[in-house]
Amino acid sequence: MKTNTMQKKRVLIIASFAGSLIRFRGDFIKSLVANGFEVFTASPSYTEEDLQLIKERGAHPIEFNLQRTGLNPFKDFKSILELKSIMKENKIDLVFPYTVKPVIYGSLAANMIKVPVISLITGLGFAFTGLTRKARILQRFNETLYKLSIRKNKFIVFQNKDDYQLFLDRKVISKKQPVAFVSGSGVNLNEFTFKEKNPADKVSFLLIARLIKEKGISLYMDAARALKPKYPNAEFHVIGALETSPSAISEDELHELHEKNIIVFHGRQMDVDKHLHQRDIFVLPSYYREGIPRTTLEALACGNPIITTDSVGCRESVKEGVNGKLIEPQNLEALIDAMEYFITNPDKIKEMGINSRKYAEERFDVNIINNDLIELINKSLK
């Protein structure tokens, strides 16, 4: 797998949020370094901890300015020029951007100086849900920018077939463009270890997500309100940082339900594997256009049955009735039924949890995914 040339090939990974470089790409950075690449990371707003962790993995972090919200290439033209000069100064051989802005701006910058790009489409988010007029306008705008920026990319990597089909249908890409598929960002099976579930007198549920409505938090809380009086021993846990976005769940509502003992709100947590081991079933009723949600992959690896929606990205993690349940998006009754199924059939939790881990090993092992990506990089550099 290692590159044969004496001069190490230089790969630039571009992110819009520095924390994601460790959480989602930490193992990828280590794999690239182990395979003889010199790795640079570009992101806005590194913390001291981010910088330290990236350097520990053998990469060189570089900061650039980027507004995380709003997509306006005229406003963000400085970001594009900044990325271009980072690529030139560091003699970058290949650019690897992920998430919307890095893919669009990173690809535009690389195109200016003819540096090859492999772009990773990690889910299309709120803009591609078509749920509101604003989302539909945003979608058309994003489609135009994607079309302009990624047309010369060596590979466009998708995390699910639905996003690829949408890009074809909307003529963002043509069938001639080289594409590849990976099963999400993968999960480190040594870090997220299996623990068998043996629920006795109480069944506990856990949701880990950004605390915004599109992730299905309100539905989850409504299901907890409906089920708690009927099954007082059942527990409904929530992990996530408070958000400031327009669709954020209010802190007051979370604390009120916590005080009433309907949910257990943990706020932001770093050691999610510990919480997954302590809880029985992982729930994510998202109706956001996901790639493949990372939290779900971690839950699979830890041996939790999954309840999620039969929607883009989410459906990839569940074999219906084997390791969990798929429900219709935004359907509260279906969510309540699925959760009640596990409360009244606790013997199914252990069996489905074992199947979750098997599925993680077969399809979502981070080593499989990173090897696939490195193979694409080697092909692109030939």
Image (cartoon, rainbow, N blue to C red):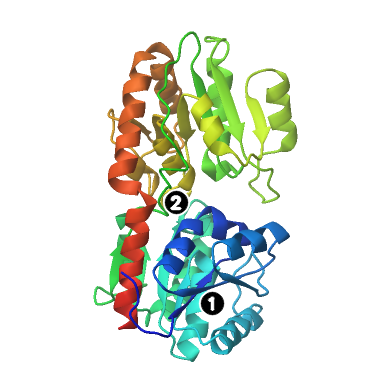
Q: Quadrant of residue 78?
A: bottom right
Residue placed most toward the observer, 342 or 286: 342
Q: Please, which residue is most extreme toward the left here?
A: 176
Q: Position of 200 compared to 3: left or right?
A: right
Q: Which residue is mark 2?
A: 290
The three-letter amino acid code for the residue at tag 2 is Glu
Q: Position of residue 44 (x, y in %)?
A: 66, 68
Q: Position of 326 compared to 67: left or right?
A: left
Residue placed most toward the observer, 52 or 379: 52
Q: Position of residue 222 (x, y in %)?
A: 56, 26
Q: Quadrant location of the N terminus?
A: bottom left
Q: Please, which residue is most extreme toward the bottom here?
A: 113
Label 2 Cα crowd, 10 Å radius (few <14 / some 14-19 / many 20+) = many
Say if residue 288 shows up in the picture. Answer: yes
The mark that comes first in sequence, 2 or 1, is 1
Identify the residue shown where x is 38% and y is 44%.
311
Q: Which residue is mark 1?
A: 105
Q: In this picture, is 35 found above or below 303?
A: below
Q: Secondary structure at mark 1?
A: helix
